[in-house]
Amino acid sequence: MADRLAEVSAQIRNVRQLEAVVTALRGIAASRAQRAHSLLAGIDAYSSVVSQAIGQALTLMPADYRHPAGRGGERTGLIFFCAEQGFAGAFSERVLDQAESDPENAMTFVIGTRGLAVARERGLNPSWSIAMASHVDAVPSLANDIGDALYEQIASGSPSTIQMIVPRSTSGGSIRIERQSLLPLDLSRFAGSSAALPPLTTLKPDELLERLSAEYVYARLCEAAMHAYAAENHARMMTMTAARHNIGTRLTTLTQREQHLRQEEITSEIIELAAGAEALSGRR
């Protein structure tokens, strides 16, 4: 019985150590998600400024100007923002589920090491992949790398349209998967400038519009990557919360078992003492 009690006590110590690790991971994930959400307002403001600039640049173009639809082929490009690290539940699986509704010849870009592993398990061979940002300061560089890869693929002849599969955490505590169109840009959505005088520029109107469009795509990629980073950490936080609940249940069971064994041990000792006292009394 002493051996069983020692074994249960050791299990309790191990589970409590695991609880400390899970609590730490949950705290780190919550801090990272909060940090990412605090930076989204700045990205949105930057995107809004670029959008207004595109609207003003359009006033410099001829009235019959039509933005080129792109030089790519007929294939669709899909950017999947998945998880970089583990302990995020079915986060990457939910993002990659969106691929089931697309043609088999769609060109896929997978962001995130864990997402890449899940994609390959499903028989999906991405045309391009990269590690997801592991901290918020890496998001701008990640957006640059994704943009460079997109333009390289478009210049080589495919794809003609680019869509992003972006996970976003909601105020209700859940994660929503959104499909967003990235390229080609629909310039009709940008409101023209209401200023009485046209903007002063040092570039040709078409070159200015091209540069602003590239800047807008970069802003959209930054926004998507930041939302995905926040959602991944939110998913990890929820997973750790569930794990912590399960650990608490396990600790309760083990503690009850330990108490039961201790009580059995005490009872056995009392019985042995009583039996010994009775035997001693009988001999006297």
Image: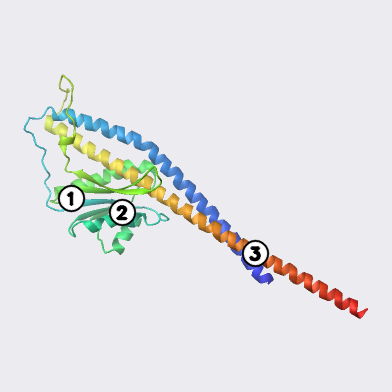
Q: Earlier in the sequence, mark 2 or mark 1?
A: 2
Query: In terms of depth relative to the viewer, which is nearer, 141 or 184?
Result: 184
Give the residue displayed 22% in from the left and 33% down from the top.
51
Q: Position of residue 149 (x, y in %)?
A: 22, 48
Inter-mark Cα distance, 3 to 1: 63 Å
Marking on residue 95: 2
Single out the residue that lies furthest toward the top. Answer: 196
Q: Earlier in the sequence, mark 3 or mark 1?
A: 1
Observer-side mark, 3 or 1, equals 3
Above or below: residue 63 compared with residue 259: above
Single out the residue that lies furthest toward the front. Answer: 172
Give the residue displayed 71% in from the left and 66% down from the top.
263
Single out the residue that lies furthest toward the bottom. Answer: 283
Residue 185 appears in which quarter of the rendering? top left
Q: Secondary structure at mark 1?
A: helix
Query: In terms of depth relative to the viewer, which is nearer, 199 or 91?
Result: 91
Side of 67 where 40 appears, left or right? right
Question: Which amino acid is tagged 2?
Answer: Val
Single out the residue that lies furthest toward the left. Answer: 64
Marking on residue 153: 1
Inter-mark Cα distance, 2 to 1: 22 Å
Above or below: residue 178 compared with residue 243: above
Side of 161 where 96 appears, left or right? right
Q: Position of residue 98 (x, y in %)?
A: 26, 55
Q: Earlier in the sequence, mark 3 or mark 2?
A: 2
Question: Which amino acid is tagged 1?
Answer: Gln
Q: Position of residue 6 (x, y in %)?
A: 65, 67
Side of 185 where 16 appears, left or right? right
Indicate the quadrant containing the C terminus: top left, top right, bottom left or bottom right: bottom right
Give the residue displayed 74% in from the left and 69% down from the top.
267
Which residue has dot 3 on it? 258
